[in-house]
Image (tube, rainbow, N blue to C red):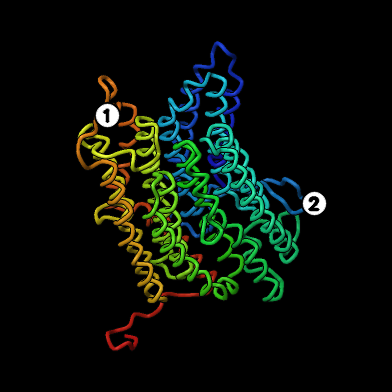
Amino acid sequence: MSSLPLLTMMMVVPLLGAIIVAALPGDSARLAKPIALGASLVTLVLALMAWARFDTGATEQFQLAEVHPWIPQFGVSYAVGVDGIALSLIVMAAILTPICLLAAWNDVSDEGYSREKRYFALMLVLEAFMVGVFAATDVFLFYVFFEAMLIPVYFLIGLFGGPRRQYAAVKFLLFSLAGGLIMLVSVIAVYFAGPGGSDGFLIENLTGNLDASPEALRWMFVGFFIAFAVKAPMWPVHTWLPDAATEARPATAVLLVGVLDKVGTYGMIRFCLQLFPEASQWATPVVITLAVISVIYGALLAIGQTDMMRLIAFTSISHFGFIVLGIFALTSVGGAGSTLYMVNHGFSTAGLFLIAGFLVARRGSKRIPDYGGWQRVTPVLAGTFLVVGLSSLALPGLSSFVSEFLVLQGTFMRYPWAAVIAAVGIVLAALYILLMYQRVMTGPKPTFAEGEAPPDLSWREKVVVAPIIASFLFLGFFPKPVLDLVNPAVDRTLQIVGVSDPAPANASGSEK
């Protein structure tokens, strides 16, 4: 138990900030943005404190734990705690939220203080739920946060998005609700298969203690996996993402794709693998196949896009294929690479969406053909766009390269055919990123009416992109802090599943 309830405080602070922002009277509504930014920065400080208190050598599965009875008649507890995987994702969310708030500073400023208040309040509510879903160690509490996240995202897209915002918001909601309802059936089944009691939904009590037939456990696995595949998203249940990411504001798209979608891949590790180890091994060939399809399919569709936001959304489908591939390779290298990939993808996707948002704010169009030659007008913007793009295509020396290499290495140890096919996605990534940069930034200098030339990055926008680019360089050259954090959790997960890394083979194919 932690003497200071850091995880609860990380949920309470943004919720209080959201209430204060929403309740501001008309003459004080201009304070909504600084109050929201301040609340997110306090949450970031709490997240860093949690990282500092985390002991990577501890034997218990969850640290900073809090357990309180909630609905004891149904075995439900308010139980939160983190292992290295959950903590790394919480810290990533806590870093990205103030970046997104600062990036969105003027997104709705011309629409009145009332809409500003609602927009920034919803962003803070979303942050609180993101912390909750990664920190929950009670299966039912996880489900509550899993579904509660839909509410702020639905309104952020439906109220503040683009021309087709209502369609995108409803499609996002229907896909997510369908997956969540399927998972609810498995959640109930897990309770009845578990030991029961007043804390019968605690993950630690359920792991290894589910009393059901192999067929029943496989059906429970499928229920969880479908919900997480929708959230991730994976092919073929991915179609909501391009619409949602395209119609959402750039800052909303960052939190949606960079953080919320990680709930799907995180859930596969936390619930699919740990609660259903035999079923996970049974389903692995199918999941690996779906992951490889996602890698290639997302990359191919990204190449053909003319909408920048839609292109970035399809790149994420490809990247999530890599993440799932590493998870179900069931190797320590692949698992560590997948978790590191989740963190790195959060920052690289944030850079892509936010830089694209800066371009759209200047040009008024998301269409790539409407640009060209912008590096001659906005050189700093072009330079940051190039660095962010190179990180997304996994250039050596930048953060995504390390995680992608680990995923492919870990996959090759057990499924060489899958690693070889997925490696094609790296070549395709270079195509869709470099072609987008070429079409947007290179070419003859565009002509603008006198006094209408777009400005280069402002000081606020430079402050937004600086920590993102710093993360590329830091984690590209020194990923050790994150790997040290997640490796014990990855090893523990593989022990629960009952697998170990394959023995290396020499050139003749025999084991050494």
Quarter of the image that includes the C terminus: bottom left
Image label count:
2
Q: CA distance from mark 1 to mark 2?
A: 60 Å
Q: Which mark is residue 73?
A: 2
Q: Nearer the viewer, residue 296 or 491?
A: 296
Estimate how packed mark 2 is, as few (under 14), some (14 to 19) or many (20 or more) residues with alpha carbons within 10 Å: few
User: What amino acid type is highlighted by mark number 1?
Assistant: Asp
Is 367 above or below relative to 113? Answer: below
Q: Is residue 89 left or right of residue 5?
A: left
Q: Position of residue 78 (x, y in %)?
A: 66, 46
Counting residues from the N terminus, which is met first, the one under dot 1 or under dot 2?
A: 2
Q: Is residue 266 left or right of residue 333?
A: right
Residue at the extreme top of the image, as rendered:
27
Disc 1 secondary structure class: loop
Q: Which mark is residue 456?
A: 1
Q: Position of residue 360 (x, y in %)?
A: 38, 34
Q: Position of residue 295 (x, y in %)?
A: 42, 62
Q: Nearer the viewer, residue 267 or 372?
A: 372
User: What amino acid type is highlighted by mark number 2?
Assistant: Gln
Q: Give the quarter of the image for residue 420.
A: bottom left
Disc 2 secondary structure class: helix
Which residue does the image show at 38% across and 45% down from the upper left? 347
Is 209 above or below relative to 17? Answer: below
